Image (spheres, grey):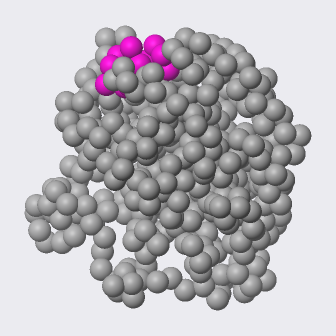
Amino acid sequence: MSAHGFSLNGCELGVATAATQIEGGNADTNWHHWAAEPGHIKDGSTPARAADHWNRVAEDTALLQQLGVKHYRMGLEWARVEPERGVFDDSAIEHYRDELTRLRDAGIKPLVTLHHFNNPWWLETAGAFEKRDAIDAFLRYTRRMVESLGDLVDEWITFNEPNVYVVACYVEGTWPPGSRSPRGAQAVAQNLAEAHISAYGLIHELQPFAKVGVAMHLRVFRPASKFNLRDIGAAVVGGFLFQSALHRAMSTGLFVPPLLQPKGVRPGKYYDFQGVNYYSRSMVTGLADGVAKDVAVSDLGWEIYPTGLAIVLGQVSRAYPGPIYITENGIADAQDAFRPRFIYDHLRAVVTSGAPVERYYHWSAIDNWEWADGEGPRFGLVALDYPTQTRTMRESGRFYADISANGAITDAAYDRWVAPCEYLTNADTQ
């Protein structure tokens, strides 16, 4: 191949979604209640519409087949399967069984996320993961899901981006429950880590050959000024508090301050793969998290920094040996103007990193309800018209299908889809 084309070296492609972001309907969750209060969601939307995936599973499975992917990361809506504490809804479980069966019949392997920022309202109103009894609730839910779905699924993510959940919900207060409490954040991080470690053991007890991990949001932290000691120190401390401490606890059972070593947890290996969600880097000025100047950015203003993915993969592979799944990587690009280049640049970073990356899941399969940003950001390989629910394959989706079919980016694919793309910089958008 030429300098433009390259092989994925056996790394298999998938796409990812999350239940609350695509299913629609009025599940009784923390996010449905939060979105109902004015001012919480940028465009005033709620997850009640989303992509109506709950009613369009067959149509969306056909779209996955068009994308040619071998893997699909999907989430379960805890509030649907356990609408009241300790009371499970067999019809909702059967719905997920039908979806998983369709995927398997289509030759697509599911990777199922148990918790993707989504709490049942009964759990949220009881204090959610600020309270230790949430661990028992999560384990009860996990047991029921593995027992009910385990003949169709043997790969599980316990928690999606637990560090983002802690920071957005309990430090910044921009997500439900809107708390700003360092003590609450510490308790939530502690309980999430213990819940994962316990769930890891439970799933393996029920499914000895299962693969279990966490999808951790990992960023590159850099000082805004290489010569400012305050910025340098803040970048180190920020990275440790935002991701490293919790990542270590969940992966190895080693808890370091501000987390506390639980009496019943022994140091060990609590992952079968490392799940990496990567989007951007943070340029740190004191306590402020910023974006560099004159750099390529997404519609959300996030820096496009493919080199950071290679950096993160190197860090993870050294600290936590074993298979790596890139469980999310994608971009908000409503015009589909530079998504093909984004995919190209990040897949090249994967291949050149030398890390043992077995899977790459693009975020997202279809445009989705993007939490506090509502229906505005467009992350999908498939475009969604919200009012009509019409799905349209984007050119980036066709590009992704071509990569899936070839296990490589060919010169022809580069010329057709990547070469015409140019990033916008934050200098252009100001």
Q: Nearer the viewer, residue 308 or 388?
A: 388
Up-down: is 263 above or below 234?
above
Q: How many marks?
A: 0
Residue placed at 28% from the left, 44% from the top? 173
Q: Magenta span has 172? A: no
Magenta-colored span: 128-138
- Is residue 360 visible in the rendered structure shown here? no
Residue placed at 56% from the left, 28% from the top? 79
Q: Residue furthest left?
A: 229
Up-down: is 78 above or below 223?
above
Q: Position of residue 400 (x, y in %)?
A: 73, 67
Q: Position of residue 51 (x, y in %)?
A: 65, 52
Q: Which quadrant of the view contains residue 260?
A: top left
In the image, 352: left or right of 418? left
The quarter of the image holding the N terminus is bottom right
Up-down: is 219 above or below 18?
below
Residue placed at 58% from the left, 20% from the top? 82
In the image, 255: left or right of 118? left
Prevailing SS of the magenta stretch: helix
Q: Which quadrant of the view contains residue 205?
A: top right
Residue placed at 33% from the left, 40% from the top? 169
Q: Position of residue 332 (x, y in %)?
A: 52, 67
Up-down: is 92 above or below 40?
above
The quarter of the image holding the C terminus is bottom left
In the image, 382: left or right of 269? right
- Is residue 88 visible in the rendered structure shown here? yes
Q: Magenta span has 133? A: yes
Q: Position of residue 64 (x, y in %)?
A: 78, 54
Q: Nearer the viewer, residue 421 or 367?
A: 367
